[in-house]
C-alpha cells in the first residue's frame, strides 16, 4: 500500500498521528544536534528490523481489501515511524560527517 494512503488514513482515523509525527521530528532534531564522529558512524551502521517484505505486502493487501485490523495498522505505522526517524538521523549523521570533513 502506498505510504501516502496510510498517512492520510492515519490522520483521518488517528488525529494523534499528526502529533506523534511532530514528536519524531523534534526528537530527530535534538539527537542530530548532539552528534560527534563516533555517534554519527554508529547511527549510519544501524539497520531497522521490521516486517518482512512479505508481511508488508500482506498488510498492503489487507488494507486494499479493507481488512486491515487495528493491530495490523499499528504494526505498519510503528515500523513506518521508526524507519522515518532512522532515515532522519542517518541523514543528519551524513551531513555532520560531510561538514566536519570526515566522510
Image (cartoon, rainbow, N blue to C red):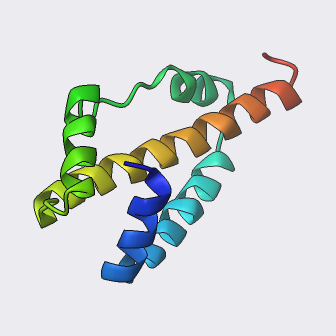
Asked whether the viewer can see residue 14, the reply is no
Asked whether the viewer can see residue 72, the reply is yes
The structure residue drawn at horizontal position 57% and vertical position 53%, both measured from the top left corner, is 28
Above-or-below relation of 60 to 30: above
- Count of numbered marks: 0
Q: Residue furthest top?
A: 103
- Front residue of 73 and 28: 73
Quarter of image, res 90: top right
- Front residue of 31 and 58: 58
Above-or-below relation of 16 to 101: below
Please state if 75 lies on the left or on the right of 13 as rendered.
left
The structure residue drawn at horizontal position 38% and vertical position 81%, both measured from the top left corner, is 12
Quarter of image, res 92: top right
Above-or-below relation of 54 to 34: above
The structure residue drawn at horizontal position 56% and vertical position 24%, both measured from the top left corner, is 44
Instruction: Check the picture and name the quadrant holding the C terminus.
Output: top right
Residue 6 is situated, as x and y percent measured from the top left of the image, at: 39, 61
Please state if 40 lies on the left or on the right of 59 as rendered.
right
Residue 50 is situated, as x and y percent measured from the top left of the image, at: 27, 34
Residue 62 is situated, as x and y percent measured from the top left of the image, at: 18, 51
Above-or-below relation of 40 to 88: above
Q: Residue furthest front?
A: 65
Amino acid at each position: 500500500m502506498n505510504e501516502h494512503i496510510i498517512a492520510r488514513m492515519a490522520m483521518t482515523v488517528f488525529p494523534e498521528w499528526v502529533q506523534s509525527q511532530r514528536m519524531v521530528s523534534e526528537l530527530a532534531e535534538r539527537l542530530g544536534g548532539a552528534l560527534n564522529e563516533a555517534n554519527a558512524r554508529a547511527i549510519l551502521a544501524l539497520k531497522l528490523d521490521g516486517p518482512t517484505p512479505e508481511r508488508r505486502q500482506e498488510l498492503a493487501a489487507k488494507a486494499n481489501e479493507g481488512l486491515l485490523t487495528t493491530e495490523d495498522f499499528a504494526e505498519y505505522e510503528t515500523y513506518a515511524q521508526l524507519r522515518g526517524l532512522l532515515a532522519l538521523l542517518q541523514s543528519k549523521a551524513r551531513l555532520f560527517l560531510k561538514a566536519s570533513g570526515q566522510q
